[in-house]
Image: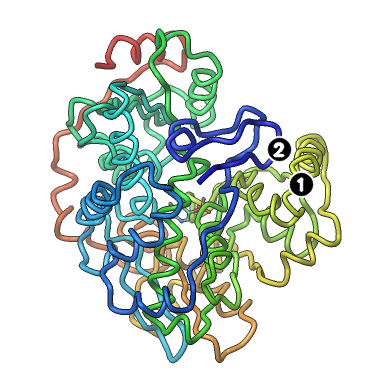
Amino acid sequence: MRYISTRGQAPALSFEDVVLTGMASDGGLYVPETIPQLSHDDLAAMAGLSYAEIAFQVMQPFVGGEIDDDTFREIVREAYATFNHDAVVPLKQLDANHFLLEQFHGPTLAFKDVALQLLGRILDHFLKKRGERAVIMGATSGDTGSAAIEGCRHCDNLDIFILHPHNRVSEVQRRQMTSVLANNVFNVAIEGNFDDAQAMVKASFADQGFLNGTRLVAVNSINWARIMAQIVYYVASAVALGAPYRQVSFSVPSANFGNVFAGYMAHQMGLPVKQFIIATNTNDILHRTLAANDFSKKELAATLAPSMDIVVSSNFERLLFDAYGRDGKAVADLLERFQKEPTALADAPLAKLRELFSSHSVDDATILEVIREAHHRTGELLDPHTATGYRAAERARADQSTPVITLATAHPAKFAEAVVKAGFTGVPLPPHMEDLLEREERYTVLPADLAAVQRFVAENRR
Ligand SMILES: *Cc1c(COP(=O)(O)O)cnc(C)c1O
């Protein structure tokens, strides 16, 4: 399997190289050159299989033989054994035709665990094979950092440095990162805001001299392996509800578009999906683009669903590549214009997207209303991200006869502030995390100074 860039200029890469590389040298994102197909019979035969076995079967063609089957099966089995539910991502029925896919049974209580538990292990496998070590650097305002740390804590060949803004992440989110005491995990609290932390990570990727040749790896959602891992739960949940004999729709709380793009990949592989509903908070670039062809940046707003607070939706580029007939030049031109000024998609690609995608935007007041209403109607306490998906599923679904699956991307205990604002007394952490607030923490406070951060990384990597 070869991977090509959405901007058409960078060299094609193997799976191994694409996982270790991140962004393409032409500024684009890597996508598979051809899409493996799941036939009607392949899907029918998945009924009743374990999540790990479905995961192996869905992902194996993307790995393209670069990890032998027995080893890859074992990697997948280990990754999903860290989840606290035998179904890994269980489905829960809300009413006759509306289901929740609970994606929060992993170590950090949010859907990013599904991808990062696998990515850490795949990276470690390739590094071991090459006899190399690598450094991971990332900046986080919450969910990604803790999921990346949990995914890498057992990796012998990786050291991970996660920067978070000092005193500006919630206590639960901070402790999920800083209570991991493994000797390859380094938490750095930056005396500055998230943008300061992000800028230092970007500068470190742009000039890696401070690492003396050691590879720097990104684990953000542009890494192809994260998308690949997320395709699986679309297939597994659709099969559980009757695919290939019955269509389903999905409603997906969205930000960088990694999650819903994985759903689109499942559809391209042959999964019978009627509709993808893109749910956004008031950072609504995806909704404005789909609904009004307004493809433009808007100032960042801090919302009750903070893991969806974005200005630009990086993985949308992967969908644009297909919508523009895989014309890398057209994508590069469009995105160049987008960086400079408000722009719009051409008519034909937009029409193509609208055949499969709808969208809906949900503001903070509505998030609170939905949390109350969903609890009243179904007994479920939704986290604020899931609440956007729930509302979007109700407002934007094309027909009532096709079952709709709303992705529950986080556990409500992780975003208790919104739940309390909605009028509830609070949400207990699940049993395996009950003692989180008593666990020992370890982190280093550093000034927002690039040289100081790079010195810390260079001196502490093993
Ligand atoms: C990251 C995240 C999202 C957004 O996912 P994308 O792949 O960026 O679209 C939604 N909800 C939660 C809880 C998240 O952590």
- The amino acid at mark 1 is Asp
Residue at image coords 42%, 75%: 43
Sequence-wise first label, 2 or 1 = 2
Q: Are marks 2 and 1 in contact (CB under 8 Å)?
A: yes
Q: Is residue 69 above or below residue 190?
A: below
Q: Is residue 198 above or below residue 423?
A: above
Q: Is mark 2 within 8 Å of ligand 1?
A: no
Q: Residues within 10 Å of mark 2 (few under 14, many from 20)?
A: many
Q: Which residue is mark 2?
A: 8
Q: Which mark is residue 327?
A: 1
Instruction: Please state if 191 lies on the left or on the right of 337 as rendered.
Output: left
Q: Is residue 340 above or below residue 368?
A: above
Instruction: Please state if 374 lies on the left or on the right of 29 as rendered.
Output: left
Question: Looking at the picture, how far across and down is residue 139, in whole percent?
Answer: 44, 31
Of the pair 5 and 369, the residue shown nearer to us: 5
Question: Looking at the picture, how far across and down is residue 213, in whole percent?
Answer: 41, 11
Question: Looking at the picture, how far across and down is residue 286, in whole percent?
Answer: 67, 56
Residue at image coords 59%, 62%: 363
Instruction: Please state if 52 lies on the left or on the right of 446 as rendered.
Output: left
The answer to whether residue 139 is visible is no
